[in-house]
């Protein structure tokens, strides 16, 4: 393997060669895997033995239809099947989301899961990348992200919670506020692929909130949670119209027989699954402590089943990766090809303590030599940057580190102006998030219009008159407004988020801020199609937790976010 390791990484279209390829290059046994983020404790050995005993039937015959498998999963999750679409891995669902629902632009914080940047770029969409700052531990500031989306005029927003590769976590109330503030966008996607490993909040998932909204999709993973990447299965949750649109495009047998077998096994193994999540969370704390003891190594807080680490100054990630593999048979994820990252960063999957001790020993020898005196990895020459598959974005991020998106806009020149005169958005009760326009205090000045791409910008205060659209101009296509929608009388905007009256359930009375102008971009916070926000439909302020549906058998199976009582 030592002679071929570099060519193995260069010859693959993915970030790392597959375990099968690595096994073929060795004696048939693959390395210790700190690269692929899956659950090392589930399925249990007994479950694997059961699947092995039925292997012949599983691979011989067709699986049931996706509808049958989805119905069984929904019975377990206590979700309505019409709100769920199962895919052959989350990547298949991301592909169809892009083809069907992303029309011209998508915003995503970076670094993140590569398919959220690569997939829309492959189909010619504009991808607006919001750089997460190393100086703030790669934490996502939702208020700044919302401002960035408005300045760019982006039509689709993506949030990964926890984020991959850094494991950054957002509390549920903040995500709900963001969804309400972005209710006028074509689509908001909340990728919860790693949420079941989180323990910062009791019920962090927004699946219940997504089903109430016209423009929200929540993406969930099964392969990562169940430690079965090879089976390829995941699902999305949305309102019936959105879920049905994606489901109608999927092949009838897009789910394989292994996926079916595992889904039907789950109801008998809830206790083991909950215990596996509990053990991963304990291992994450232990692994973080051991890695933090290494001189010069920075470990960022994570709520995923992986840790994002920055190597000591002078350590090149590709060198560390190759030496760990060839000298210690340890596979790690070097993040130089992630947009917004560089080869100074590694993502390390949480594994049992015996494997972590092997990793720490290997890092000690590669980084410092056996005695930790003197760097075994040589310093780079002055002016030499860490390798990155996205040098331009990487350079902008490093040049503006700590300066936020205003610094990025200045470094990049025109394209996403964030003028200093724009007042800070109104803050919701949870702090930090702008409230919807219907509840915000009117601001005195509208946003300036960029000279290089003139388009009418929405005013944060109610606008009773339509805004004319100059011709021609590249204004994103808006949802058509209902022809019979009544023209509202101007009313002053309230100073605090109002609760929807009971009569609103039968005949909602529109306000000027809820009805967008007949032409021009939809104002910030105005619901798509001129409707009410889901929070107003429920008669809440958007911060109240929805009742947990739970999973069947509360004593043995966790809730839909994997955070039930049994998980501890």
Image (cartoon, rainbow, N blue to C red):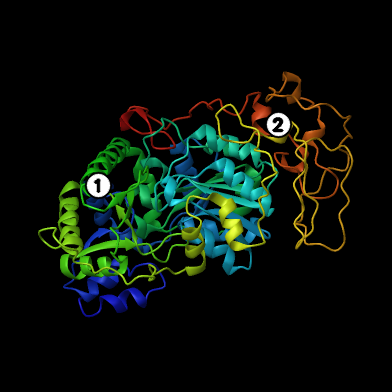
* Mark before the other along the chain sequence, 2 or 1: 1
Query: Label for residue 292?
Result: 1
Quarter occupied by residue 311? bottom left
At x 33%, y 27%, the residue is 555
**Residue 548, x across and y down, in percent:** 48, 28
At x 70%, y 44%, the residue is 421
**Residue 23, x across and y down, in percent:** 23, 70
Tag count in the figure? 2
Query: Label for residue 554?
Result: none
Residue 154 seen from this side: no
Q: Residues within 10 Å of mark 1 (few under 14, many from 20)?
A: some
At x 42%, y 66%, the residue is 337
Q: Residues within 10 Å of mark 2 (few under 14, many from 20)?
A: many
Q: Which residue is mark 2?
A: 440
The kind of secondary structure element at disc 1 is helix
Furthest residue in direction top, as rendered: 502
């Amino acid at each position: 393997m030592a002679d071929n390791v570099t060519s193995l990484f260069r010859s693959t279209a993915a970030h790392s060669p597959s375990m099968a390829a690595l096994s073929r290059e060795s004696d048939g046994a693959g390395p210790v895997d700190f690269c692929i983020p899956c659950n090392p404790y589930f399925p249990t050995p007994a479950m694997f033995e059961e699947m092995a005993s039925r292997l012949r039937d599983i691979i011989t015959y067709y699986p049931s239809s996706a509808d049958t498998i989805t119905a069984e999963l929904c019975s377990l999750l206590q979700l309505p099947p019409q709100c769920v679409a199962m895919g052959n891995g989350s990547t298949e669902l991301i592909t169809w989301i892009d083809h069907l629902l992303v029309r011209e632009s998508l915003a995503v914080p970076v670094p993140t899961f590569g398919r959220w940047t690569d997939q829309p770029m492959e189909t010619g969409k504009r991808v607006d990348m919001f750089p997460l700052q190393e100086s703030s531990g790669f934490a996502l500031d939702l208020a700044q992200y919302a401002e960035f989306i408005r300045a760019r005029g982006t039509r689709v927003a993506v949030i990964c919670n926890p984020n991959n590769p850094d494991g950054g976590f957002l509390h549920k109330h903040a995500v709900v506020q963001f969804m309400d503030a972005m209710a006028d966008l074509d689509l908001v996607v909340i990728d919860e692929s790693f949420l079941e490993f989180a323990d910062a909040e009791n019920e962090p998932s927004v699946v219940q909130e997504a089903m109430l909204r016209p423009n929200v999709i929540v993406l969930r993973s099964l392969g990562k949670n169940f430690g079965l990447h090879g089976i390829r299965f995941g699902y999305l949750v949305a309102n019936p119209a959105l879920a049905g649109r994606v489901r109608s495009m999927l092949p009838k047998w897009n789910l394989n027989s292994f996926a079916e077998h595992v889904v039907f096994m789950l109801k008998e193994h809830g206790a083991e699954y909950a215990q596996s999540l509990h053990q991963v969370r304990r291992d994450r704390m232990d692994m973080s402590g051991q890695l933090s003891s290494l001189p010069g190594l920075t470990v960022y807080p994570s709520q995923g089943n992986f840790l994002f680490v920055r190597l000591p100054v002078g350590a090149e990630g590709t060198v560390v990766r190759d030496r760990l593999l060839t000298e210690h048979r340890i596979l790690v994820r070097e993040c130089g090809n992630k947009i917004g990252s560089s080869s100074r960063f590694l993502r390390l999957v949480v594994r049992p303590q015996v494997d972590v001790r092997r990793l720490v020993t290997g890092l000690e020898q590669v980084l410092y030599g056996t005695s930790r005196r003197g760097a075994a990895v040589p310093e780079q020459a002055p002016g030499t940057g860490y390798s990155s598959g996205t040098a331009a974005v990487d350079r902008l991020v490093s040049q503006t580190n700590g300066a936020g998106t205003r610094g990025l806009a200045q470094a990049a020149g025109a394209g996403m102006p964030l003028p200093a005169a724009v007042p800070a958005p109104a803050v919701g009760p949870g702090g930090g998030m702008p409230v919807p326009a219907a509840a915000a205090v009117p601001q005195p000045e509208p946003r300036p219009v960029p000279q290089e791409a003139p388009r009418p910008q929405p005013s944060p205060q109610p606008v009773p008159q339509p805004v004319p659209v100059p011709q021609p101009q590249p204004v994103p296509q808006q949802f058509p407004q209902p022809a019979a929608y009544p023209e509202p009388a101007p009313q002053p905007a309230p100073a605090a988020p109002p609760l929807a009256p009971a009569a609103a359930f039968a005949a909602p009375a529109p306000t000027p801020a809820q009805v967008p102008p007949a032409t021009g971009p939809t104002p910030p916070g105005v619901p798509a199609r001129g409707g009410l926000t889901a929070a107003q439909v429920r008669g809440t302020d958007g911060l109240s937790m929805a009742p947990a549906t739970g999973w069947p058998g509360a004593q043995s199976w966790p809730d839909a976010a994997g955070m039930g009582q049994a998980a501890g």
